[in-house]
Amino acid sequence: MKNSKAITAIDIIAFLLNDLLGWFIIIMYDITNVFGKFQDLKLHRALIVVGIVHIILSMICNVFFFKNERTKHHIQIGNKLFIYNIVMTFCPYLYLAFTQIVS
C-alpha cells in the first residue's frame, strides 16, 4: 500500500515538473524578445527547439505511461489523465501563440 502511494506521489511530482517546464520555456522565450526585437537570436531559436522537443517527449511519455495504466487497471481514469496531460503540455504554447497573434 505504501509503495503505491509513493509511486502515485512520484507521478504527480513528475507531471507537475513537466507542466512547469513548459511554462519555464515560454517565460524564457518571452524574456529573449523585448519590444519585438530579439536580444539573442540564437538563444531564441534554441528555446523554440527545446519547446518542440518538450512537446514531443511529453506526448511520447504520455502515450507509453497511460497505455500501461489503462491495460493494468481497466478503468477510465487513465484516459482522463492522458487528456489532462496533453492539455497541460500544450497550454503554455497555446498561450504564447495567442499572445503573439494579439500583439
Image (cartoon, rainbow, N blue to C red):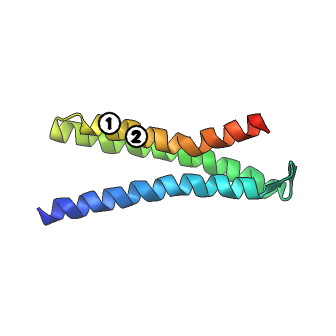
Task: Say whether residue 63 is visible.
Answer: no
- Is 4 above or below relative to 78? below
Instruction: Give how far across and how far down residue 42 sits, in percent.
Output: 80, 55
Q: Which mark is residue 53?
A: none
- Is 71 above or below relative to 39? above
Image-quadrant location for residue 101: top right
- Is 75 above or below relative to 28? above
Q: Nearer the viewer, residue 36 or 82?
A: 36
Q: Residue at x 18, y 59 (%)?
A: 4
Q: Which residue of the protein is positioned furthest toward the front in this rendering? A: 102
Say how many tags the image has: 2
Verify CB contact (< 8 Å) between mark 1 and mark 2: yes
Instruction: Give how far across and how far down residue 77 sits, in percent.
Output: 25, 39
Q: Which residue is mark 1?
A: 80
Q: Is residue 34 left or right of residue 98?
A: right
Q: Quadrant of the C terminus?
A: top right
Could you tell me which secondary element the residue under label 2 belongs to? helix
Q: Residue at x 62, y 48 (%)?
A: 51
Circle 2 Cα neighbour tier, 10 Å, few/some/many (<14 / 14–19 / ≥20): few
Q: Which residue is mark 2?
A: 84
Which amino acid lies under the numbered mark 1 shown in the image of this protein?
Lys
Task: Say whether residue 12 is visible.
Answer: yes
Q: Nearer the viewer, residue 21 or 57?
A: 21
Could you tell me which secondary element the residue under label 1 belongs to? helix
Instruction: Give how far across and how far down residue 79 sits, in percent.
Output: 30, 34
Circle 1 Cα neighbour tier, 10 Å, few/some/many (<14 / 14–19 / ≥20): few
Q: Is residue 37 left or right of residue 27?
A: right
Mark 1–mark 2 distance (CA, rounded to whole Å) = 6 Å
Which amino acid lies under the numbered mark 2 shown in the image of this protein?
Tyr
